[in-house]
Each structure stands twice: as structure tokens, then as C-alpha cells.
Image (cartoon, helix red, strand yellow):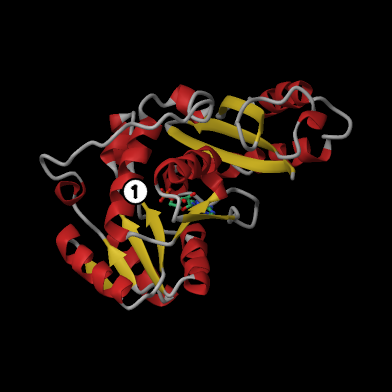
Amino acid sequence: MLLFKKASDLGRFIAEIKNEGRSIGFVPTMGALHEGHLSLVQKSLEMADWTVCSIFVNPTQFNDPADLEKYPRTPDADLGMLVNSGCQTLFMPGVEEVYPPGLAEGPSFDFGSLDKRMEGARRPGHFAGVAQVVRRLLELVQPRFLFMGQKDFQQAAIVRSMLQQMYPGVNLVLCPIIREADGLAMSSRNVRLTQAQRNLAPLIYQTLLDAKKKIHSHTPAQLCTDAMRRLAVPGMVPEYFEIVDGHSLLPVQSFEDSDYVVACTAVKLGEVRLIDNSILKN
Ligand code: AMP
């Protein structure tokens, strides 16, 4: 696996790959890799001629400085996992490579309803930071395919909108959520859970599954109320449980109103904030 730390070196290499007419698959990550990340790499290896993964903990998408500081960083383990996965190139830049002084900001995006609710409402500036880093990385990597996880459903919807607005030649490939055996969605943040919190955490997926079972007998509003109640156990604080149209991310009043319905939730276990979702109807 080739490792680049400098944007200029990566840029020269990408130019060579593109000159050879090879398609690039890109997997952006913030490291602390797990099987979820590797499933994206695997998909890229299947679909693209050349796979580039990036590891960059992007400071501009953290609205909470403590979350940035405590974000897990495991570069040695990450390197080993990527080499074993067959990933061909890793870009692991420092902040100054991604945001060099004088870098043009570019026009800001209008995401309409996509960034107003759920994570957008609770994490001010988060999606502006995501859009900023994805734009910069796309300019550097110039992929044909961009692999992202359904785990971050709202993020993927926003990036899809960004691609439509500015990078129509890049195809977003949404990959399914990889879970632990007990249903907890894999996340870099899971290692921060205490044993007691870890034991509680599968309730998130159980609640999503329960909602899915009841879509023929309950309204979205009833399911959201039930789910919020179910998640409010000692040690867990649900922030939201929303049932939304998968395209607009606006709440649906009835399951008949949309052919693509997703339940999205965020909960806090102590200091650790976890998100998860389930496609209820598609
Ligand atoms: P992150 O490192 O958390 O920024 O995630 C990098 C990419 O991996 C994003 O596209 C995530 O949606 C995706 N991802 C994270 N966790 C999972 C998971 N459990 N299953 C599938 N994809 C995931």
C-alpha cells in the first residue's frame, strides 16, 4: 500500500492513475478503523480500478472541542488493517495539508431541508465542516466512486446533494451498516463506552427493529413517541428519534406519504454520542 502524507505528492500520483485511464474509488474516514470502514474499502476494491482511503480527523466538523480531543486515534492499527484489506493507497495528511493558508473557500452549498434537522439541528456547523473537507478531498483524489456508510444517513444525503450541485461525475455508493453481533452499529466512538454503557447500547438497534415491525399498525408519530420512551433508560439519554422521508429528510406524517422512509436516532451514553438508523420502507 502506498502512503501519502502530502497533498502535492498525492496529487502527482493521482494524475498518473488518471492518465492511465483507471477509475478511482475513494473511502474517506477519520480513522480508528473497524469492519464498517473495511466494508467500504472492500466495495471500492470490487468496483474501482484503484482504491484510495483517507484518514483525517477533520477539526472543522467537530462542534464540540472535547469530542475532537477525545476522538480515538489508532494510526498503527489502522495501517495494518488497511494493508490486510488490499487497499492500494492511503492518504493521511496533517491539518496544514488539507487546509493550507490561503486555500480558497469556494461557494457555500444550499442543502435545503437536508441539514436543518436531526444532526444539523444539534451540531451547529457540523455539516458545513463535512462539506468543506469532502470538497477538498474530492479535489485532491478526483474519484469516480465515493463510498460512504448508511450509518451516517444524513451526512450521505448531504454529500449526495453536494455531488449533484458540484461534482456530477462522482458516483456516491451508499454501503450498509455493519453491526456488532448484538446489533450495535460499529463506530469509532464505541471504544469510549464503559462496560455498563456497552451493555446498554444494543437497545438502540432493538428499538429501531421494533419500529420497523410496527409500521403497518402504528403512525410515525406513535412510533417516535414509543421509541423515545423506550430509549430513556437510566444511563441513556435519547436526543431524537425521527421518522423521515429518505430523500428530503423531513418527517413523514404517514407511511403512505413516502416510498422511502428511514428512522434516525441519536442517543447519549454519558459523554459518548451515538447515532443509528434503519430503513423502514424502500
Ligand atoms: P468515520 O470514520 O466515522 O468518519 O466514517 C467513515 C465512513 O465509514 C463514513 O462514510 C461512515 O458512514 C462509514 N461507516 C462508519 N461506521 C460504519 C458502519 N458501522 N458500517 C458501515 N459504514 C460505516
Q: Is residue 109 left or right of residue 6?
A: right
Give the labeled residue for mark 1. 72
For the residue pair 213 and 258, the one nearer the viewer reads as 258
**Where on the picture, by quarter, is residue 4?**
bottom left
Q: Residue furthest right?
A: 217
For the residue pair 136 and 28, the one nearer the viewer reads as 136
**Where on the picture, by quarter, is residue 219?**
top right
Rendered location of residue 235, percent (x, y): 55, 29
Q: Is residue 180 above or below residue 212?
A: below
Rendered location of residue 42, percent (x, y): 50, 69
Q: Residues within 10 Å of mark 1 (few under 14, many from 20)?
A: some
Q: What residue is drawn where x is 53% and y is 40%? A: 157
Rendered location of residue 65, percent (x, y): 28, 31
**What SS does tag 1 mark?**
loop
Q: Is residue 65 visible?
A: yes
For the residue pair 249 and 67, the one nearer the viewer reads as 249
Q: Residue furthest left?
A: 101
Q: What residue is drawn where x is 49% and y is 40%? A: 161
**Where on the picture, by quarter, is residue 205?**
top right
Q: Is residue 139 left or right of residue 112?
A: left
Q: What residue is drawn where x is 29% and y is 43%? A: 58
Q: Is residue 233 visible?
A: no
Q: Is residue 42 above or below residue 280?
A: below
Q: Is residue 171 above or below residue 242?
A: below
Amino acid type shown at disc 1 = Pro
For the residue pair 44 and 166, the one nearer the viewer reads as 166
Rendered location of residue 216, percent (x, y): 87, 34
Q: Quadrant of the C terminus?
A: top right
Q: Quadrant of the N terminus?
A: bottom left
Q: What residue is drawn where x is 52% and y is 73%? A: 46
